[in-house]
Image (cartoon, grey):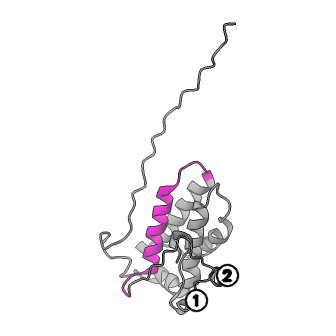
Amino acid sequence: MGGLFGGLIGPGRLDLALDPDTLAAAGTALGCGAIRFLAPDECPVSLVSAALAHLAAESARQCGICVAGTGSLRDAVGALTNGTADSGLLTRLQRWSTSLPGRGACGLLGAAAGTAGSLLRAFPDLVRAHLDAPCPGCAAPADAGRLTVPVPNVARRTVPRPRSVSSSR
């Protein structure tokens, strides 16, 4: 709902009016105006995993909390999709989804945390089921229409200091 910043709403909320106050009360927003419906065979956990990977890759890497936060969210939901999540993962995701919004210099971290939180709110049973057994929807091949974005390799190089210009007057 509303692009990556609006998060997910569950199937029981399809009757929401496209009104800012109504959507805000439901924990979402129209954002950029994009609305995407999931196909019956699409797994919301896999969709959020791809979205968080995209957001983590889009970080400008200028804000430590954003780099760490988006990476942690990406890795946590990624563990749900590949069946390697531990028992404390849901507690961490819940904590991050409520404590990280507003802590970054821009809205990217808030979008990532909000998207993860919306998954927990809209599909709690499905998320818990991912702790118990692998999901066929998440195990689909990566080229099955998923949004995949490689995380760029950021080269660390020294930036020369500007030389001071001395006046000869």
Is residue 68 inside the magenta stretch?
Answer: no
- Res 83 seen here: no
Q: Which residue is mark 2?
A: 21
Who comes first in sequence, dot 1 or dot 2?
A: 1
Judging by the rendered image, the residue that carries numbered circle 1 is 16
Residue in the foreground of this view, choosing between 106 and 47: 106
Taking depth in this image into account, of 90 and 64 the one nearest to the observer is: 64
| Mark pair 1, 2: CA separation | 11 Å
Secondary structure at badge 2 equals helix
Q: Position of residue 61 (x, y in %)?
A: 54, 49
Residue 55 is inside the magenta segment: yes
Q: In the rendered image, which quarter is residue 140 located in? A: bottom left
How many numbered circles are shown? Answer: 2
What residue appears at the point 59 percent right and 25 percent down from the top-left corner? 162
Q: Residue at x 57, y 84 (%)?
A: 18
Left or right of 16: which side holds 41?
left
Residue 40 versus residue 73 in the image, above or below: below
Looking at the image, can residue 128 be seen? yes
Where is residue 137, by image quadrant?
Answer: bottom left
Q: Is residue 144 left or right of residue 162?
A: left
**Where 33 falls versus 73 (above or below)?**
below
Q: Residues within 10 Å of mark 1 (few under 14, many from 20)?
A: few
Which class describes the residues within 10 Å of circle 2: few (<14), some (14-19), or many (20+)? few
Q: Which region of the structure is painted magenta?
A: 40-64
Give me the residue at 46% from left, 62% from top: 54
Query: Do the residues bearing badges 1 and 2 touch, measured as CB atoms within 8 Å?
Result: no
Looking at the figure, which quarter contains the C terminus? top right
Magenta stretch: helix, strand or loop mostly = helix
Specify the amino acid type for callout 1: Leu
